[in-house]
Amino acid sequence: MILSTLAQANLLGLGAGAVWGIADFAGGFVTRRTFPAIVVAIAHGLSLLVILAILFLAGTPLPSAQAIVYGLISGTAGGIGLMLFYEGLAIGAMGLTSALAAVVTAILPVVYSYFLQDHPTPTQLAGFAVAIIAIWMIAYTPGGKAHSRGLGLAVGAGIGFGLLLIFLDKAGAQGVGWALAFSRVASASIAIAFSTILLIRKKGRITNKSSLGGWGRIVPLAALAGALDTSGNLLYTLSAVHGHLDVAAVFASLYPAFTILLAAWLLRERTTRTQALGMAFALVSVVLISI
């Protein structure tokens, strides 16, 4: 049985969430060894080179001005959002920061789509509500005091990620490959700028132990995280372009579930009852949204 175009788009959205969840898992490992800005600079810089090589080898026509502008806006928003997110994790309760950022990420494209694009059905709206509850339950883990600045950074990160999803969709409508490329140009530039400032302040040290071996461990993991993140961006953009922005964004925002499942499988980390219930809610939301 051949799936409809809309069903395929929905599956791509879920695929984006899965790949982003794995990317976060890989990124979590490497950020234990070095500073987040350096990880993003390596990951986004290397993935940009790969994207450009593929585009030139494939003879892809040059992009339109709209694709360039929207791509740069998406990458700028995403790059800034990522920096705010990491800073929020550093000073606030990690579970609360992650949950709040993920919820805002999902809500922003839904609101944008509701007022400027097609209205979802009542069943889909119910599915969106269930999905947002699920995201919170999956990502949030009790512990640690809420820090007002940390919460502000989490909201800012969520807005950045939400704008990334919105403008990737707009850029992707002009050409998916170049949308990803110019998004990476902006995010890599921002990360490299932050990294340069950081390395100057740290006098060139990228880890607590200044050694050449540090680079040998950091670069492969950062490259893997970048490749996964880029693949997730590709799946999401295809989902949004060929389906509905709000559906693609909500499905992709379920990424914390895949990170937790992978941690449970590989690291034997136990999930809480709230997280398990959140995953059940996520499955219900998928059904409601897909009807």
Image (cartoon, helix red, strand yellow):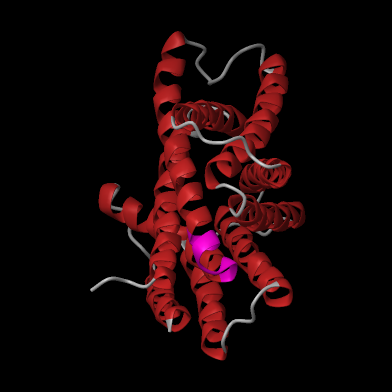
* Viewer can see residue 65: yes
Q: So how many labels did they put on this image?
A: 0
Residue 10: x and y in percent read 43, 68
- At horizontal 52% and vertical 12% (from top left) the residue drawn is 210
- At horizontal 63% and vertical 62% (from top left) the residue drawn is 100
* Viewer can see residue 253: no
Where 267 falls versus 242 (above or below)? above
Residue 77: x and y in percent read 70, 47
Residue lying farthest left? 1
* Left or right: 222, with 99 as reference point: left
Q: Nearer the viewer, residue 94 or 65?
A: 65
Where does the magenta region start and end? Answer: 239-246
Residue lying farthest bottom? 122
Where 224 falls versus 168 (above or below)? above
Residue 274: x and y in percent read 43, 73
- Image quadrant assignment for residue 121: bottom right
* Left or right: 238, with 85 as reference point: left
- At horizontal 27% and vertical 71% (from top left) the residue drawn is 2
Is 130 in the magenta?
A: no
Q: Nearer the viewer, residue 190 or 240?
A: 240
- Image quadrant assignment for residue 173: bottom right
- Image quadrant assignment for residue 269: bottom left
